[in-house]
């Protein structure tokens, strides 16, 4: 239905994200297509002061995330069921996407239209055609790249 298959991310990804994003400000992090919530759960341990949101359109991964979140002491995350198109990106200062090249033009338009200056957009593995990232981080253990745009 969404044309976006499940893509598990690298176990090193959370560490790269916390190296990129300054911990000196109030961070509201959105994982678009959060799947089973793994990235948000890992990041919530590394950065207890951040607030984490996930949005997922597939019911079973979303439900798993919600149930698993009840067992965490640090409850600095929320998982939304639904489409990222229905969220306003304005309230997030970091948006992360690991979706598919098929949807990258649509998400890039939403990022450009709604995110505030000084925010960060990250795309894992898939670039946005015609818009070079400010930073590209290649992982040592695989060929995937984290693309980072400073807005």
Image (cartoon, helix red, strand yellow):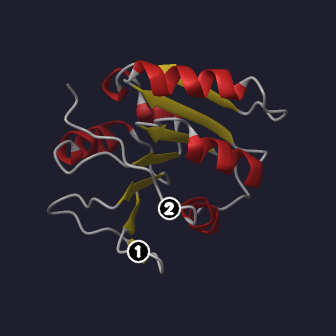
Residue 79 position by quadrant:
top right
Residue ID for mark 1: 142
Q: Residue 16 location, x and y as percent?
A: 57, 67
Residue 29 position by quadrant:
top right
Residue ID for mark 2: 10
Residue 46 position by quadrant:
bottom right
Mark toward the start of the polypeptide (2 vs 1) = 2
Q: Of all residues shown, which one is farthest toward the right?
A: 73
Q: Which mark is residue 85?
A: none
How far is mark 2 from mark 1, CA to CA?
8 Å
User: What quarter of the picture does the N terminus occupy?
Assistant: top left
Q: Residue at x 33, y 43 (%)?
A: 111
**In the structure shown, which secondary structural element does the residue marked by tag 2 occupy?**
loop
Q: Are marks 2 and 1 in contact (CB under 8 Å)?
A: yes
Q: Residue 143 location, x and y as percent?
A: 35, 74
Eyeballing the image, is 70 above or below 39?
A: above
**In the structure shown, which secondary structural element does the residue marked by tag 1 occupy?**
loop
Say which of 50 and 65 sits in front. Answer: 65
Q: Residue 118 location, x and y as percent?
A: 50, 54
Say which of 100 and 84 sits in front. Answer: 100
> How many numbered marks, from 0 up?
2
């Amino acid at each position: 239905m969404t044309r976006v298959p499940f893509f598990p991310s690298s176990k090193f990804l959370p560490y790269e994200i916390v190296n990129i994003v300054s911990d000196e400000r109030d961070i509201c992090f959105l994982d678009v297509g959060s799947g089973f919530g793994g990235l948000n759960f890992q990041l919530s341990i590394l950065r207890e002061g951040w607030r984490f949101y996930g949005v997922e359109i597939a019911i079973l991964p979303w439900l798993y995330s919600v149930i698993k979140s009840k067992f965490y002491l640090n409850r600095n995350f929320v998982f939304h069921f639904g489409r990222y198109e229905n969220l306003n990106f304005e309230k997030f200062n970091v948006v992360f996407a690991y979706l598919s090249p098929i949807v990258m033009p649509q998400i890039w338009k939403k990022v450009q239209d709604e995110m505030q200056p000084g925010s960060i957009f990250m795309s894992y593995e898939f670039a946005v055609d015609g818009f070079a990232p400010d930073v590209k981080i290649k992982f040592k253990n695989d060929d995937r790249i984290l693309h980072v745009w400073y807005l």
